[in-house]
Image: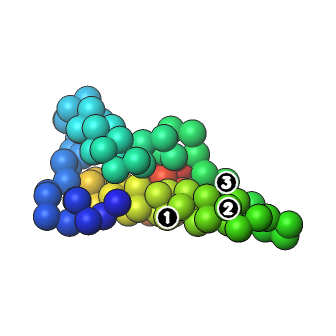
Amino acid sequence: MESVTSNVPLPRLTKVNYENWSIQMKALLGSQDGWEVVQEGFVEPTTTAGYTAAQNKTLKEMRSKDKAALYMLFRAVDESGFEKIASATTSKEA
């Protein structure tokens, strides 16, 4: 997910631009297959015992999408916004 955004500046959330910022972030995260995980959330399973190879692959992909989206959200807020979401462990929580 990061490959596309590494050369493109992310929209920056400030105290006065939430509406525009949220529209831009939805579009950006959607283009990177990350909006769904932000909207629905990602829950880390307590155990993966009994998972098939396909289930493990899907879990790894979802975990990766969630962490990439979380990282983009961390980068797309100003300092005071970051302080509010710094302890988030999932993109939905942020």
**Tag 3's secondary structure?**
loop
Q: How far apart are marks 1 and 2 (CA)?
A: 15 Å
Q: Which of 20 and 64 is in front in this view?
A: 64
Which residue is at 34% across, 60% downward? 1
Pinpoint residue 16: horizontal percent, then vertical percent. 19, 35
- Compared across the picture, whether 50 is left or right of 83 comes to right
Pinpoint residue 92: horizontal percent, then vertical percent. 52, 47
Residue at image mark 1: 64
- Compared across the picture, whether 25 is left or right of 63 comes to left
Which residue is at 51% across, 46% downward? 37
Which of label 1 and label 2 is nearer to you? 2
Residue at image mark 3: 43
Q: Which residue lies furthest to the top in this view?
A: 19
Q: What residue type is labelled 3?
A: Val
Pinpoint residue 79: horizontal percent, then vertical percent. 27, 60
Within the image, what quadrant is residue 46 found in?
A: bottom right
Sequence-wise first label, 3 or 2: 3
Sequence-wise first label, 3 or 1: 3
In the figure, 76 relative to 38: above or below?
below
Q: Which of 53 and 42 is in front in this view?
A: 53
Which residue is at 23% across, 38% downward? 24
Q: What residue type is labelled 1?
A: Ser
